[in-house]
Image: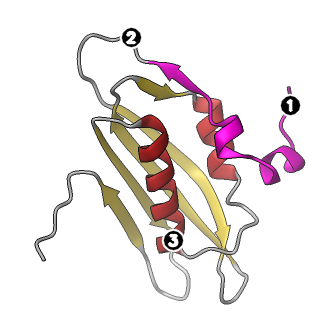
Amino acid sequence: MRYGEKEIKEFDVDKHLELWPNDAKNDYVIKITLPEFMCCCPRSGYPDFATIYFEYIPDKLVVELKAIKLYINSFMNRNISHEASINEIYNTLKDKLKPKWIKVVGDFNPRGNVHTIIECRSDMIVPK
């Protein structure tokens, strides 16, 4: 099946984020780089571009690569901030995969002389 604009716009994480069983006996890290992330600024409507770095140590499940690509592309026409987009990606992948460890980094292209990097990690503990 060919995925076009309609499929990306209508991407439903619960229906389309394909997960596979992890049959490996040992722990290992999966590193995925998605260099063409785009969302729209909720204030100006201008496009924001980023590279998403996704790493995880799987437990029982791994994500199918085409499915992760389509999920990331589904942000293309959404008005969402840098912080909200990376936190949503992190929470979605953490909830769906239930990995032993996960990290999602959004390295946004500079706009207006501001370069933003957002990082969410499952091992980040901040004392209260």
The circle drawn on residue 24 is none
Q: Position of residue 6 (x, y in %)?
A: 89, 49
Q: Which portion, as a residue range, is magenta?
A: 1-21
The circle drawn on residue 84 is 3
CB contact under 8 Å: marks 3 and 1? no
Whether residue 109 is visible, yes or no, is: no
Q: What amino acid is found at the position of numbered circle 2 in the picture?
A: Asp
Q: At 62% from the left edge and 29% from the top edge, which residue is drawn?
A: 18
* SS assignment at label 3: helix
As for residue 17 lying within the magenta part, the answer is yes
Quadrant (top left, top right, bottom left, bottom right) of the N terminus: top right
Indicate the quadrant where residue 80 lies: bottom right
Whether residue 89 is visible, yes or no, is: yes
Query: How is the model colour-coded?
Result: secondary structure
Front label number (3 vs 1)? 3
* Image position of 92 with respect to 113: above or below: above
Q: Which residue is mark 1?
A: 2
Q: What amino acid is found at the position of numbered circle 3 in the picture?
A: Ala
* SS assignment at label 2: loop
Q: Which residue is mark 2?
A: 23
Give me the C-alpha separation between circle 3 and circle 1.
29 Å
Q: How many marks?
A: 3
Give the class, few, some or many, for how many residues have Cα within 10 Å of label 1's Cα (few <14, many ≥20). few
* SS assignment at label 1: loop
Give me the C-alpha separation between circle 2 and circle 3.
33 Å
The mark nearer the N terminus, 2 or 3, is 2
CB contact under 8 Å: marks 2 and 3? no
